[in-house]
Amino acid sequence: MTRNPSGGSQPSAGHPDHTGPAGHPGPSTALLTDHYELTMLRAALRSGAAHRRAVFEVFARYLPVGRRYGVIAGTGRLLDALRRFRFGGEELEFLRAAGVADEATLSYLESYVFTGDIWGYAEGDCYFPGSPILVVEGTFAEAVILETLILSILNHDCAIAAAASRMVTAADGRPLIEMGSRRTHELSAVASARAAYLTGFASTSNLQAGRDYGVPTSGTSAHAFSLVHHNERQAFAAQLAALGQGTTLLVDTFDVAAAVRTAVELAGDQLGAVRIDSGDLPVVARQVRGMLDSLGARRTRIVLTGDLDEHSIAALAATPVDGYGVGTALVTGSGAPTAALVYKLVARAQDDAVSAPLHPVAKRSVGKPGRGGRKWALRHRDVSGAAAAELVMTEPPVPAPDDRVLLHQLVRGGEIVGGEPLEAARARHREALAELPVHALQLSRGYPAIPTVFGPDASAAAYSEG
């Protein structure tokens, strides 16, 4: 059974897809941060560097093993969280009592509002190693304390979206239900449902995601429902009476063959679907399909669940099933629960003057070298429209006719300008995948689908150290 909410918090054009219940901004996100952000702020206020113009960038040095592309997800959630990044009385009192901040720092935080600019890859787009997926420009103080919030949202949502995208590809048009809420943190479950829907999942079992983001919700029943009744016939009859013939009945609590016969006997050929959650799924699914057809229930669908991931879904391609439910693998990123994104200072002014020019900075740590300078990016495409390379440079680009500009302004002078409906990101992901080379969709291990090429200015040797 699927519900497509019509009265939930549906996003509107030009705004983030969630602004809290009844349009209110919601609770503060200011303490969803690491202590060390305020350590740096406190010391920077003392040194005078706090008000120095700075540019931070979010990027991944590499993709998880075997992945050919990453997926941008969480942008809408991030913009909502930024809107609520305010230090009120309770937050300030906690910081004072815990000795985290001195009076000068508390005074700064009391009036904190991000007034800078943020550019980012559009939600739903793909990215590759080195892609500058988010660029934050502001004073050092106002930008540095956003690091933890930005990374916690993007690292989670991008990881889930990348796994979900591979699952959608493996399903090859068969609908997918996100049903991992019972396998992760309660708030991560909501974010995971949003990320999965963005990449093409049809629905979620999570009702909060339905209310907050307009994701269609669906749900069947658990084995407990059959067990609490005297027998399976009684359980099926109760569910059919309550939900109608279009419901989905779980048929593997006891004997699958007997359950299928009982289900069709009670619901007739209008039975919506049966769900199989255990056993040798390809074998059982073929047997059930044969039984349903022989009993006249040719339109009854078969949904498979049970620890599925993109690889097991792909292996079921030739099996006569109509959809899948995915839980644990989805909410854990199918083995890659983080996107390994980092937030690095890449440019700063030499003094506090507003007009002071920005100079590249980059660390030189062994194994983790940086590339200084504020970046811009293009997706270079060939004449057929297929993506050929990720071009990253330190000057605003002049795109060739077939190139696609990747960075879009999300925040201008502290004002959120890049919010959009979730459906727009969902459509964009389909388009982004369509322009990638065919081998990008392979599930076998391999290199990124396209190379990241850094322009000569971005790879100059004359980096300064911060």
Image: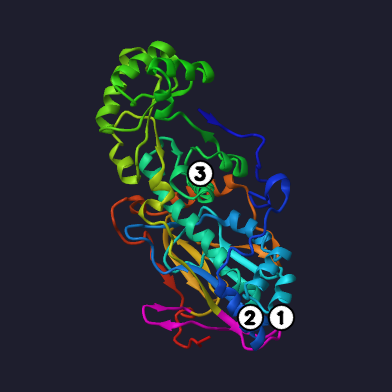
The secondary structure that dominates the magenta segment is loop
- Give the label, 3 or 2, closer to the camera: 2
Q: Which residue is mark 3?
A: 197
- Packing grade of label 1 (10 A; few <14, some 14-19, many >=20) is few
In depth, the one of 288 and 27 nearer the eye is 27
Residue shown at 50%/65% (left/top)? 378
Residue shown at 30%/17% (left/top)? 258
Q: Earlier in the sequence, mark 3 or mark 2?
A: 2
In depth, the one of 229 and 2 nearer the eye is 229
How much space separates mark 2 and mark 1, taking CA atoms? 8 Å
Q: Looking at numbered disc 1 in the image, what kind of residue is underneath it?
A: Ala
Q: Which mark is residue 104?
A: 1
How much space separates mark 3 and mark 2, taking CA atoms? 41 Å
Q: Looking at numbered disc 3 in the image, what kind of residue is underneath it?
A: Tyr
- Position of residue 10 in the picture relative to residue 339 (left or right): right
In depth, the one of 233 and 419 nearer the eye is 233
Q: Is residue 368 above or below residue 222?
A: below
Q: Is residue 255 above or below residue 337?
A: above
**Residue 401 appears in view:** no
Q: How many marks?
A: 3
- Residue 159: percent from the left, percent from the top? 44, 56
Q: Which residue is mark 2?
A: 42
Q: Looking at numbered disc 2 in the image, what kind of residue is underneath it?
A: Arg
Mark 2 near mark 1, Cβ–Cβ under 8 Å? Answer: yes
Whether residue 44 appears in magenta in the rendering, the answer is: no
Q: Earlier in the sequence, mark 2 or mark 1?
A: 2
Image: magenta residue range: 347-371
Q: Earlier in the sequence, mark 1 or mark 3?
A: 1
- Packing grade of label 2 (10 A; few <14, some 14-19, many >=20) is many
Residue shown at 58%/47% (left/top)? 422
How much space separates mark 1 and mark 3, taking CA atoms? 44 Å
